[in-house]
Image (spheres, rainbow, N blue to C red):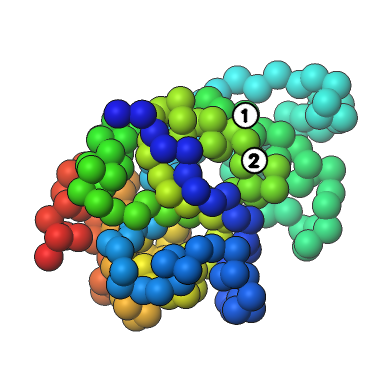
């Protein structure tokens, strides 16, 4: 089965709140909860091995990075260590470097075979599939769509969302597959069932037990949870 191209590639940044007009970019059925079984699924470190690629791949500096070898290695070390950018909302030399390296990771990332099988099962079972990512789709939409197509991953919508719990609430989505610590910690409180890949331990101190999210080893485990 080939992947669908996806009906919508909206670039919406759902922060703590979002103006209602943003939903005008979707079709009528998409705005009415309950008309179709819907699930939102993250990409990086959920459907793919983004962090593994970032940590273990070799990246070669070229003129497009616009930095010296020394700065290149320094920035790469900071990126791998998760050092935040201190430029606020401003575009900086480091944020441009981060985009360049992340773009390479998006292209190189390998899809989880069980994740691909799960998404194909969803399509066959009549689910509406929303790919919901924190990637900057203003820059990365084309490579993201190509990666999904190359891996035969079907989807109906592709969105950028900073706060996926807010996004799911606005769309009336009850199920979210995501490894984001905020979503894991707060999903149940807001009526969103969150399922996250079990990495052995929470990746961020934001995650505190008890929380209502369910960890899974394989995507197949999610099927009975969303059918209940």
Residue at 39%, 57% in the rendered image: 40
Q: In this view, does 204 lie above or below 212?
A: above
Question: Residue 198 location, x and y as percent?
Answer: 28, 49
Question: Residue 205 location, x and y as percent?
Answer: 44, 64
Q: In this view, does 4 lie above or below 172?
A: above
Q: Earlier in the sequence, mark 1 or mark 2?
A: 1
In which quadrant of the rendered image does the C terminus lie? bottom left
> Where is mark 1, residue-wise?
104
Relative to 165, 139 lies left or right: right
Question: Residue 203 location, x and y as percent?
Answer: 42, 54
Q: Is residue 154 above or below residue 157?
A: above
Relative to 125, 76 lies left or right: right
> Hey, which quadrant is residue 171 in on the image?
bottom left
Residue 201 visible in the current orientation? no
> Hey, which quadrant is residue 224 in on the image?
bottom left
- On residue 164, which mark appears? none
C-alpha gap between disc 1 and disc 2: 10 Å
Q: Is mark 2 on a helix, strand or loop?
A: helix
> Where is mark 2, residue-wise?
140
In which quadrant of the rendered image does the N terminus lie? top left
Name the foreground residue: 109 vs 148.
148
Residue at 84%, 43% in the rendered image: 93
Name the foreground residue: 16 vs 159.
159
Residue at 41%, 38% in the rendered image: 4
Looking at the rendered image, the disc whose residue lies closer to the viewer, 1 or 2, is: 2
Question: Residue 201 location, x and y as percent?
Answer: 32, 53
Q: Is mark 1 on a helix, strand or loop?
A: helix
Question: Total marks drawn?
Answer: 2
Q: What crowding class fits label 2: few (fewer than 14 Cα within 10 Å), some (14-19), or many (20 or more)?
A: some
Relative to 101, 45 lies left or right: left
Residue at 36%, 74% in the rendered image: 33
Q: What crowding class fits label 1: few (fewer than 14 Cα within 10 Å), some (14-19), or many (20 or more)?
A: some
């Amino acid at each position: 089965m080939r992947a669908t191209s996806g009906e919508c590639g909206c670039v919406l940044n759902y922060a703590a709140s979002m103006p209602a007009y943003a939903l005008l970019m979707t079709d009528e059925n998409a705005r009415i909860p309950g008309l179709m079984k819907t699930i939102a699924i993250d990409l990086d470190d959920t459907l793919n091995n983004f962090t593994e690629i970032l940590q273990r791949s070799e990246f070669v500096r070229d003129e497009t990075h616009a930095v010296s070898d020394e700065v290149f290695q320094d920035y790469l070390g900071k990126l791998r260590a998760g050092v935040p950018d201190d430029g606020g909302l401003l575009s900086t030399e480091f944020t441009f470097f981060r985009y360049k390296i992340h773009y390479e990771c998006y292209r190189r990332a390998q899809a989880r075979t069980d994740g691909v099988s799960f998404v194909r099962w969803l399509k066959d079972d009549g689910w509406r599939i929303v790919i919901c990512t924190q990637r900057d789709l203003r820059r990365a939409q084309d490579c993201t769509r190509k990666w999904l197509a190359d891996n035969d991953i079907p989807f109906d919508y592709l969105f950028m969302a900073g706060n996926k719990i807010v996004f799911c609430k606005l769309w009336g989505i009850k199920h979210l597959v995501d490894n984001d610590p905020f979503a894991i910690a707060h999903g149940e409180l807001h009526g969103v069932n969150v399922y996250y890949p079990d990495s052995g331990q929470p990746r961020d101190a934001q995650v505190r037990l008890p929380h209502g999210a369910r960890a899974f080893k394989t995507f197949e485990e999610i099927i009975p949870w969303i059918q209940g």
